[in-house]
Image (cartoon, grey):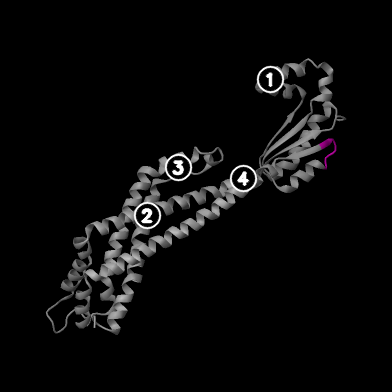
Amino acid sequence: MRCITGWTYVCGGIYLYLLKLSFRTWRIAPFSQAFSALAVGFLLFLIGFLIWLEQGIRPILSRLQREQVITAYLSPSVETRDEAKLLNEVKGIVEAEGHPEVKLVDVPEFISLMKTHHESLGRELEHLGTEMNQIIPRYISISGILKSSVFGKIKSLSGIEEVESSKDRHRQIVGVFSVLRWIVRILSVGVFFALMIGLIHLSRMNQYFYRDALIVLKLWGAGQGTLMTPSLISAFSVGLIGGVIAAMAWILGGAWLAVHMQSLSGVLRTMPSIRASLAMVFLIAGGGVGLLAGMLGGFPFSRFSEEGGGDG
């Protein structure tokens, strides 16, 4: 639509009229628009929380897949003076993989640990005298993030009788967290589509509040962009207010929700904390989905106006 035509309207007046037309939905149906903005805020907050949950599970899953405890039992033929040499050989293997914890647990230390957790059993072991050297195993404990090749290298060392690993013990937990990640992803996509569909339907319903005015503007020569402007602004306002609601909920309740999630399990304690600075993302996301929904919801009417004009 040209800024100045044979009519007396100028650009400023047209834009002001379009802006006033866009907010007609808030004057006629304020509760409907407010409830829609509240729903948008809740869904945006839910999407943000699901994304935070999925991103927090990823390092936990990676750690569970790679972290393990290897227990290498020393052969009874290994002399006490050779224990330090064997320990250094094990350290030489695992130091190339990072900085895992490596320690030798001999008979006295084993009894000390047993006394800490089971005092009576520890005292009984002490009463065995020289026989406890044959009963109590000596072992080297390696804990940390290790490659699968470490197990075979340690097992091949001379003086190592048997090697055990805790890697398979986390298999079920890893499977559960993998499934949980996929569920979170599917839920995030589903909630996003529900949000978009709701806003698109709201945008199309709002068109009935200014349908007659848009038909008149079309007769005056308004183009498709002008006809879509009220729908874009109206949906943008709902999305932006929803983004503000989601941002406030993220700032005020996000940290509390994260703490409660981390307290559910010891595995979840390593999940990252929620950053309040991400609240700005909700404002951008709210305005963005509002514009997109307004574009998709307003396009059918502008196209209909081009083809048919009015109601009949």
Q: Depth check: give the residue in front, 187 or 268.
A: 187
Q: Which mark is residue 173?
A: 4
User: Quick check: marks 4 and 2 in contact, CB under 8 Å?
Assistant: no
Question: On the rendered structure, is 78 left or right of 58?
Answer: right
Residue 281 at x, y percent in the picture:
38, 55
Quick one: SS at disc 2? helix
Quick one: SS at disc 3? helix
Question: On the rendered structure, is 251 left or right of 117?
Answer: left
The Cα–Cα distance between marks 1 and 2, rounded to whole angstroms, is 55 Å
Find the magenta span and give its range: 156-161
Residue type at mark 2?
Phe
Pointer 1: what residue?
115
Q: Is residue 74 above or below residue 1?
A: above
Which residue occupies the extreme right position in the image?
77
Quadrant in the rendering for residue 112: top right
Say which of marks 1 and 2 sits in front.
1
Residue type at mark 1?
Lys
Quick one: SS at disc 1? helix
Q: Residue at x 17, y 71 (%)?
A: 12
Quadrant in the rendering for residue 165: top right
Question: On the rendered structure, is 183 left or right of 110?
Answer: left
Pointer 2: what residue?
282
State yes or no: residue 89 in magenta.
Answer: no
Say which of marks 4 and 3 sits in front.
4
Residue 175 at x, y percent in the picture:
62, 49
State yes or no: residue 158 in magenta.
Answer: yes
Which residue occupies the extreme left position in the image?
8
First reached walking from the N terminus: tag 4 or tag 1: 1
Q: Main secondary structure of the magenta part?
A: loop
Picture quarter with the N terminus: bottom left
The Cα–Cα distance between marks 4 and 2, rounded to whole angstroms, is 33 Å
